[in-house]
Amino acid sequence: MNRHPWLRRARVLAPLALALALPAQAGLLAITNAKLYTVSGGALENATLLIRNDLIEAVGVGLTVPEGAKLIDAGGASITPGLFDAYTHIGLEEISGIDETRDDAGGNPRYSAALDVLDGLNPRSVLIPVNRIEGITQAMSAPTTGEGGPLLAGRGAVINLGQLGPQNFIARAHAAQFVPFGEAAMAQLHGGRPTVLLALREAFEEVRNGGHSGVQRDSLLGALDIEALRPVLNGEQPLVVDAQRAADIRALLKFAEDYGIKLVIHGGAEAHLLARELAEKQVPVILDPTYNLPIHFEALAARADAAAILHRAGVLLAFSAASDMGSHNSRNIRQLAGNAVAYGLPWSAALAAVTLNPAKVYGLDSTIGSLETGKQANFVIWDGDPLEVTSYPKQVYAAGVAIPMSSRQTQLRDRYLKR
Amino acid sequence: MRIHSTQAGALLALLASGLTLVACHKNEAPPAPFPSTYSAPAAPALLITHATILTGTGRKLEDASLLMQDGKIVAVGEEVAPPPQVEVIDARGRWLTPGLIDAHSHLGVYPSPDVWATADGNEMVDPVTPGVWSEHAVWPQDPGFETARAGGITSLLVLPGSGNLIGGRGSVLKNVPSTSYQGMKYPGAPYSLKMACGENPKRVYGKDGNKAPMTRMGNVAGYRAAFAKAKEYLKKEEAGGVEERDLGMETLVGVLKGEILVQNHCYRADEMETMLDVAKEFGFKITTFHHAVEAYKIADRLAEEGVCGALWADWWGFKLEAFDGIRENIAMVDAAVSKDGARGCAIVHSDDPYGIQRLNQEAAKAMAAGRRAGYVIRDEDAIAWITSNPAKAIGIGELTGSLEPGKAADLVLWNGTPFSSYARPDRVYIDGVLRFDRYTPKPVESDFALGLAPPEEQEAGTPLTAPSAAIPSSAAPNAEASPTPAAPPPAAATSPSEPATTEPAAAAASETKP
């Protein structure tokens, strides 16, 4: 029982029938009678999820449960892979308005490509339990690409929110390099978009030429920056660029092609205007599907059905909130997904945009993002439709372990709840 | 000509206090400036039938009808006799609620696009600026008004920002297209005064400007100094001795007289308690604490004092004073009961041009969190958080915010339960006038947004008004053609243990004229 602390909270949970086979075979867990949204292989009714230690051993209908496996009857509940937020600063910021708690900002040099979020990531961040108890098991923790920050902002890492403690906290170091474009970058360089793109080209020329841009006499990048950008130039590490305007995205597609860079668009308010090109060039878009206002001049064509348009064209979509609350409320990405559905995105595509697709963006799809044999056992048992705002996790599992379903917020609640 | 309620109230106050006072004024009081020019276009009588109705007064009616005529609600109930020659909408599978009301918006004063040239919500040159009015900065072409309308918002309070201790007057608007704010201004609605606690004023002035207020001590000294001065001004006014008008003092005197409502941005429990004492000292009432992420810590006191909490469902941590936000805040404020048995006044507000588009979902999250914590919250209770409670808090509770005979025909016809990620308004009526129709594409209404983007694709489905049209349900996901069982509809994805949600059935809608 102790391995399932959620059972102790049964008063607020719909009861799950539980059967224990004795003696339990070490490290073997079978969840039966579940509706499995595998993401990679459709949805399976009345199915079984078999876990051995931290990995998924088998997924299917009518599976033979090995003798001695610990059994949990899901009572028909929905199970999805753990959710993956494609862009946050979780672990790098506590209170947005308190600079002392922020490790996501890269100062103000023009280039800071070597910056490594690993040096600032805090596995004890209060944001982590708040989000993981609502099903977020992975997140990209990225350096900020805000106004006035460096043009090459540094390297982000994918973190495992479900891992309790610093071991295995990092799912993938140096998962991507982050770059602002458009209005935010213009503020840094005190110039227009051509200035920004020129600065990017100069930097990559220098990497290509082994330390000298050939354009300017002095070296622009530090030795560590050059080293950090080599995997980007080799096409091994994606370059995630904040870009909204269609013209900006078009310019970036050309730039990425010139240098053989694996481009990912973050923001993408007007990406729907170039849906076909993005699909052809296999450029993923990290999008907030609720971003529908012309709130910036570079986002005049923003619209609520952008996700549906991009998906129809075949663009790989991952969702992340555009708001300043995106890290604290990463837990709301499934609301974003649900809203994308309300505006025409197929339900399964919406679920993929918060599970398997971000894993693909950061090269982790062989180990996480779907319910498949051999993948890490990160999954969520839901009390309803996983994309519905009124639904909630009954239990979140990370690497096969049922995590404690408590956070500082549930502790505050319990302190003030009258019972 | 309309007399604005503030003016009417002032006249009544003068009359009540004796004709001698009136005689002291050589001239008649001038008419209230900036009067509303809104008038609702004529609307045909309409009967909506077979809807699930949440009245906003704590009632839920199944398979019920609502009749509206001349912009007002005439009847609501399971049996409503249709008058002759009335247009009838068969709303089977749909839900009908009062129009949503946002008690905290900056649409128009912080519009899209968000650039310095449009940032008109904070007069941050002095911490006390009661003389500025948000309406003078409302840009009616803000595209956010129509996206909010598509989300079911029919009225909203547009407030100045929270950079100042006393930020100025806010105005209630009807969410209708107009070339002027006067054309949106809610006739008969009182003004509100925006006040702010905590970090914002002390950051703007103390941290960034090296002047007062630098601390929360300075904040409180600032409110008290302003109201002490207003007391003196009121005395002078009552004695007929005001020689030179002070526009700021006129606003604060309006607060002291109870004609202007106080909307107080305040996060922390301890600061709210302080503000209640400040209000007591000077004899005014705080109508609503806004944001109030710690309201749950003092929910009983708020219920006792009859002060509403206008809250987010889940915002937290963006400032230190927002660190203690919890999902159950709204439910806990709602559940508190005063000694006299009055229930707490909980409001879901947005303060955000995106959040205002789905206030219903924010309420749904708060409702679900409350239920998980053990509170009994019915749909018909939670709808009040975004309709009748905000209506009351911004001073239009007698006019709108619930589906009752005599009230404005401000309503939203939803594609199913509003408490859902998939909920969308199919139709929005304001004073009985159809102002949004999901299946009847219209050119963009904001002049600014005109021509900026390719037109939205028409949504799959046919207009509600077409005879025998199939109801396009929210479940566009259902239509997915990928091989099963990859994508079951959301309704099918719910577990058996979950309470049945009402997904709009693919029933047929028809319009008939008996």
Image (tube, rainbow, N blue to C red):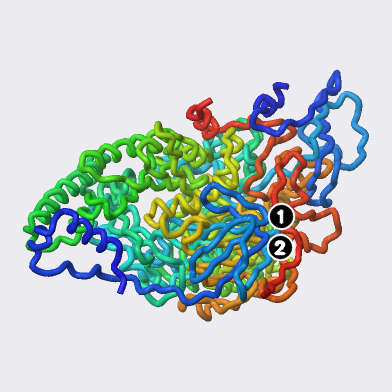
Per the image, the residue denoted by label 1 is: B503
- The one nearer the camera, A3 or B314, is B314
- Residue A154 lies, in percent from the top left, at 54, 52
Please tell me whether mark 2 sits on a helix, a strand or a loop. Answer: loop
For residue B368, side relative to residue B410 (left or right): right
- The one nearer the camera, A320 or A406, is A406
Q: Which of marks 1 and 2 is nearer the N terminus?
A: 2
Per the rendering, the mark at residue B334 is none
Among the 4 quarters of the image, the one containing residue A110? bottom left
Q: What residue type is labelled 2?
A: Ser
- Residue B55 lies, in percent from the top left, at 55, 53
For residue B392, side relative to residue B436 (left or right): left
Spatial CA span between label 1 and label 2: 8 Å
- Residue A371 lies, in percent from the top left, at 79, 44
Q: Marks 1 and 2: CB-CB under 8 Å?
A: yes
Residue at 69% over, 73% down: B512
Is residue A226 visible to the viewer in this orientation of the structure?
Answer: no
Residue at 29% over, 49% down: B201
Q: Quadrant of the N terminus of chain B?
A: bottom left
Please tell me whether mark 1 sits on a helix, a strand or a loop. Answer: loop
